[in-house]
Amino acid sequence: MVCEHLSTVEGALLDCGIAITFRGQAWSENCREWVYFDGYLDTRRIRERFGLPEAVRDHTHRGTHDGQEHGLVCDLCHDALMGLPDPVAGKPVFPGPETHGASEVA
């Protein structure tokens, strides 16, 4: 599991059934536990809903040859929750606008 600063969000993502596509040390020694989800993480809504500490920051990487990601990184623990860089039709968006769960982009 990821650090205490992100664990509540990770648990909610798992409860929604959003698939994990990767878990582990993603980029370098400066990364501890990074979890990638097959959906879009709406970081603004996540912050509103979960009240994350200042050490958790938004992260977006739009690489042209080394992948793309968008999510949250804990600067204290070097853990992260990542998803797709943009909403994609047929993929979940977390959290959904109507509920505490996920919705799908039509």
Image (cartoon, grey):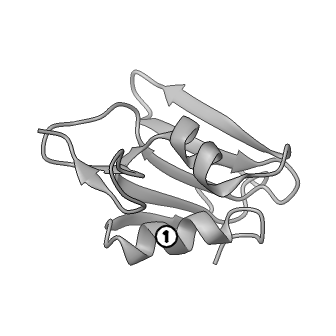
Q: Which residue is mark 1?
A: 12
Q: Is residue 83 above or below residue 7?
A: above
Q: Is residue 21 above or below residue 40?
A: below
Is 69 on the left or on the right of 24, as rendered?
Answer: left
Residue 16 position, x and y percent, is 35, 70
Is 14 on the left or on the right of 56, as rendered?
Answer: left
Residue type (three-letter) at the residue carrying disc 1: Ala
Location of residue 101 by image quarter: bottom left
Residue 23 position, x and y percent, is 51, 68
Q: Residue at x 22, y 36 (%)?
A: 88
Count of picture labels: 1
Quadrant containing the C terminus is: top left
Q: Residue at x 72, y 52 (%)?
A: 51
Q: Is residue 104 visible?
A: yes
- Give 50 or 17, whichever is nearer the viewer: 50
Q: Is residue 24 visible?
A: no
User: Within 10 angstroms of label 1, few (less than 14), some, or many (20 or more) residues?
Assistant: some
Q: Residue at x 46, y 38 (%)?
A: 69
